[in-house]
Image (cartoon, rainbow, N blue to C red):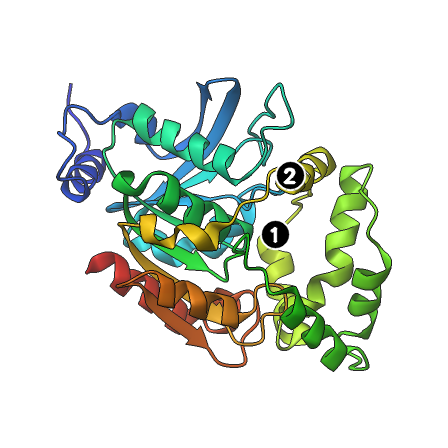
Amino acid sequence: MKIKLPLVSFLLGVGALFSSSTFAQINHAALLPGSHKVQLGDVRIHYVVSGHGPLLFHTAVGWGLSTVTYQNAFKPLEKRFTVVYVEVRGNGESSLPSDLAHMDQSDFAGDIDRLRAYLGLDKISLMGHSGGGAITLEYAEDYPTHLEKGILIDPAVFGDRDEKQTEAYMDLWKDDPKYKDAIESVRRDNSDPKTDAEATKQLESIISLYFSDPAKYLPILTKQMGASQVSAVTENAYWAAIARTPHDQEKRYNAIHGKLLIINGTVDWICPYAVVERLHEGVPGSELKLYANVGHFPWIEEPGRFFQEVTDFLSE
């Protein structure tokens, strides 16, 4: 049987990236482009493979969104890398665990490492945004010998969320017409959503806060998200699990062996840049890129710089 040239190139790219994994060990069929599902323990994990070149894993945020937004946003990376978009338990098409108590950062990191093992890889490069950044950080701390490189994009850091800085942003912006309604929504609505529609509406009511110029940039995010909905069950289980078992990620920076690239906007209200400055200081050899006057989505506000810096880091 003849193997078509694109498939040969893809498989050679996989083998080139993971020099510590023998070519025979890699589960090539499970890394072919397309949608995949695999049973890992008591959860069925969905992941999507797209692009060409060395492997780059990208994790969902954890609190109930699919990876559709990132699949639409990160097409430029797929020109140089094969991106594996992983939907950790309860996110997108991945199933929930039988016990909803197992829905925190360590559980999500465990899903990714079980997928790594299933794929026959010794090490991976992993990228995550926001809550996905917290998962990437957890993976770096829990599985230090299995992380080659980590990219944290405006990450949440559990144990160092800097709520005072978040409140300071809201106090500063509370009378700004761009943000006034969103801030009122944040301060008014703390109830657990009962339906996916309600959870999605809550997100939409505050999303303008995530941009330096909502009128300019929010339509781009809306297009990237498509018809994505937040899972209310997952969101509620996520926050309950985190409240039940607090994670002090900032106390385990010394466990990290892999190289880290940290990207953060300087006007990100929910993941303030002071947090990643401390993260950068705590992880020797990490790289920090601050984006002046940029909010929570740097690839939307400064796409040229963002994709170039990510590509350069992965290509070093």
Give the position of the C terminus as an image quadrant: bottom left
Q: What SS does tag 1 mark?
A: helix
Label 2 crowding class (10 Å Cα cut-off): few <14, some 14-19, many 20+?
A: many
Give the position of the N terminus as an image quadrant: top left
- Residue 190 image position (x, y, % from top left): 82, 52
Taking the view exactly as shown, the residue that stands out farthest to the right is: 188
- The residue to which callout 2 is attached is 238
- Residue at 78% from the left image edge and 59% from the top image edge: 205
Q: Up-down: is 279 above or below 31?
A: below
Q: CA distance from mark 2 to mark 1?
A: 21 Å
- Residue 177 image position (x, y, % from top left): 80, 80
Q: Report whether residue 51 is seen.
A: yes
**Nearest to the observer: residue 181 or residue 304:** 181
What amino acid is labelled 1 in the image?
A: Met
- Residue 280 image position (x, y, % from top left): 38, 66
Q: Report whether residue 178 is seen.
A: no
- Residue 78 image position (x, y, % from top left): 35, 51
- Residue at 53% from the left image edge and 44% from the top image edge: 67
Q: Mark 2 or mark 1: which comes first in sequence? A: 1
**Nearest to the observer: residue 93 or residue 150:** 150
Q: Nearer the viewer, mark 2 or mark 1?
A: 2
- The residue to which callout 1 is attached is 225
- Residue at 52% from the left image edge and 22% from the top image edge: 43
Q: Up-down: is 281 above or below 225?
A: below
Taking the view exactly as shown, the residue that stands out farthest to the front is: 251
**Nearest to the observer: residue 297 or residue 147:** 147
**Nearest to the observer: residue 256 or residue 53:** 256
- For this view, does 134 lie left or right of residue 4? right
Label 1 crowding class (10 Å Cα cut-off): few <14, some 14-19, many 20+?
A: some
Q: Which mark is residue 199?
A: none
Q: Up-down: is 279 above or below 215?
A: above
What amino acid is labelled 2 in the image?
A: Tyr
